[in-house]
Image (spheres, helix red, strand yellow):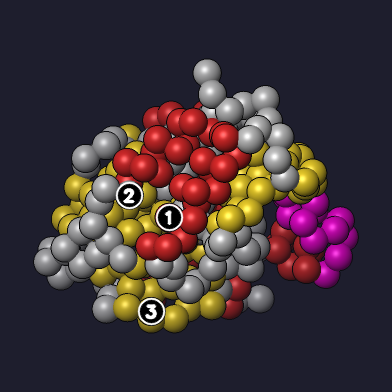
Amino acid sequence: MNGQAFFKTSLIGEGIWSISGPANDQMYLVQGRDKALLVDTGMGVGDLAGLVRSLTSLPVLVVNTHGHPDHAGGNGGFDVVYLHPADEPIMKKMCTNEYRLNDLKAFHGDGTPAFQRMAAGLVSFREIRMLPLAQGMCFDLGGRTFEVVELPGHTPGGVCLLNEEEGLIFTGDMIVETPVWMYLKHSLPLEVYLASLRKINQRRFDTLFPGHQPTPLGRENLEDLIVCTEEILAEPGIGKLERTFAGEGLLWKHGRASIIYDPKKLGD
Ligand SMILES: [Zn+2]
């Protein structure tokens, strides 16, 4: 199978491509006048680097919104990648070939044709040059600039990429319409996540590009997430038990938002 055939690509805005991977992974490529920005490298199944080269001839800056294997798993296809230092240990542990193959097995079933196809397209983990992201850093692509905004919660080193002038923000797994996973071992207390959401809510944007679906979200998704988090903190223990391949927690919903949380990890 041609390594680029794993991806579905569509132009969803001015110079903005949605790139959907085969493992429910979602990447974006944004082009400016002088440079392009790749948001996340996905699970590392398929030739993402080759695909990106076929879409743009500009130099490409590669950023991980956080260190999870479905966002940083394809880093091995690139020479230099930006990641927040707080997520580097997570990336190093969870993006190895073995870890990603186990995730794919858990999701698709061991030995299934889907699993075998993906295992054959796996981009190998390798030590590459990692550069640190920090609050307030800017990526100037020429005519459009994206600012790094820390949004700790889902992971300690999660970041969003914000362009207030155009009202655009890439949100990784921090603001999504699928349940936000806040029950993971390395997720921060819910109060920290709420503070992050309230902080980003002060900024100007109206189009949100989330980590797991190619359709942009609106501001109301963020507002619903804030209320959803407030409701859990006001009544710890609400929701029903939800099991995923990565563990279990309590699932609570409000409007378009839902969160799976650990009732023992609400505040300090
Ligand atoms: Zn994640």
Name the residue beneath numbered marker 3: 12
Name the residue beneath numbered marker 2: 201
* Label 3 residue near ligand 1, CB within 8 Å: no
Query: What kind of residue is marked 1?
Result: Glu
* Residue ID at (73%, 54%): 104
What is the CA distance from the residue labelled 1 to the residue labelled 2?
A: 8 Å
* Residue ID at (15%, 70%): 33
Q: Dot 2, how many residues are within 10 Å of its Cα: few (below 14), some (14-19), or many (20+)?
A: some
Marks 3, 2: nearer the viewer: 2
Q: Position of residue 192 (x, y in %)?
A: 46, 31
* Residue ID at (57%, 34%): 233
Q: Dot 1, how many residues are within 10 Å of its Cα: few (below 14), some (14-19), or many (20+)?
A: some
> What main secondary structure does the magenta stretch of the protein show?
helix
**Cβ atoms under marks 3 and 2 closer than 8 Å:** no
Q: Position of residue 208 (x, y in %)?
A: 38, 63
Query: What kind of residue is marked 3?
Result: Ile
Q: Give 109 or 125, whichever is nearer the viewer.
A: 109
